[in-house]
Image (cartoon, grey):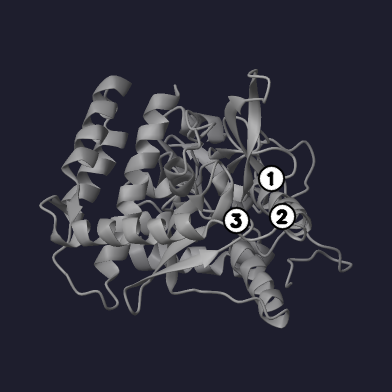
Amino acid sequence: MALRRREGGLPHASAAPGHKTPRLTGCGDSTIREVTRILEEQAIKRGIQRNADSIPLSIVSDNSQVRGIVTLDVPTGRIDAIQAKAVILATEGHQGLWSKPSDGSGTGSALAIAAGIDLKGMEITPRHPLTIRDCGIHIPLDVLGSGGRIRRENGDDVGPEEVLEGEPCVLDLRQMDADAKVWFSQTSMRIMDRLGIDISKDVIPLSPGVAYTTGGAPSDAQGRVLFQGHTTEGLPAELWHTGLYAAGRSAHTGMHGSNALPGNLLLDDLVSGKTAGEHASEWAADIKFGGNTQIEEAVKGESARISSIMGGDGMAVAKFHSKLTSAISSGSSEEASLAEVRAIKDKGITLTDTSSIMNTEMVEALRLVGLASVAEAILTSG
């Protein structure tokens, strides 16, 4: 991994909001991409099968035990089933609710909801202070440890808290450390391409935005997804939805507060993913496959759902998206927003493209339907 390094060869450690000492290291604005590349290389090296063109539609369970998943093969439009002893939900967060589904469709959380899991931590929506106003580009917090400064519009230095409180602030990167510029060159180019702002000469207007989320399926230290049930003696208890795990942005581990510290999201992703994977592999070694009947019924149910979306009389995808984003971002009371989201769900969604082959509009529609369920969970969590 091409880590940013300091003199002497050791990894460069940056200061960041909430950290008492500099401890944030990485690859500038390429950290997530570099980690993803390494993990993909390791998956290929180990011969792990990846179905990049399939999207999950539902989890198949039998008496609160996972039996597999149903997927849509996008290139062919075929509904497939994968029988499984264990399933790990490890998808992106649901931050796409405030922008567009491709920014984060919360697939793992939506699948958990459909499986009957009550999500936790949804009442907290962390805000990212370095979001460009009226644009939605999120700038890495690492820049604050490399010479970047948050200022009021009159030039006074302030911290991220002032941005999060709604004060008009700007990000000043004009005095960024010379050796740091190359590590944030992609951010610089994106800002120039999208806004025409040269960060070496101009300041960047800020407003808080949603760059990530921390709520999801409640999970224990082993990544096992929990639900409220009863013991054999009839006593209320937290039980494991057997075979179902969650990690990263799909899980609520309790690690983060109202705002995750810089660096802790990636740490949580890696640690919770490793823990869930280890426990799932050990547990599945002694378990037999099952649920053939339930899987067949689930495939029929998902096929009918896809057909209803294609031939329904709901809202167009763009309108569904616009109304859903407006409902969650409007600032109305929770009751009014919840009523609006439920009305959107009841109206449903339909397509203009009814082809089953490589139907990207269907993919967008399925993501939006999932996000609508997540939005409902957010508004009922408080």
Quick check: 361 above or below 325? below
Q: Position of residue 48 (x, y in %)?
A: 66, 76
Nearer-N-terminus badge (1/2): 1
Nearer-N-terminus badge (3/2): 3
Residue at figure coordinates x 39%, y 25% from the top left: 380
Q: Are marks 1 and 2 in contact (CB under 8 Å)?
A: yes
Nearer-N-terminus badge (1/3): 3
How many neighbours does mark 1 have within 10 angstroms: few (below 14), some (14-19), or many (20 or more)? many
Which three-letter amino acid code belongs to the residue tagged 2?
Ala
Residue at figure coordinates x 68%, y 66% from the top left: 179
Q: Which residue in the rendered view is the most extreme toward the left?
A: 313
How many neighbours does mark 2 have within 10 angstroms: few (below 14), some (14-19), or many (20 or more)? many
- SS for dot 3: strand
Rendered image: mark on residue 223: 1
The residue wearing badge 2 is 280
Name the one closer to the observer, 81 or 353: 81
The residue wearing badge 3 is 87
Name the one closer to the observer, 210 or 41: 41
Q: Position of residue 331 (x, y in %)?
A: 29, 27
Q: Position of residue 257 (x, y in %)?
A: 62, 30
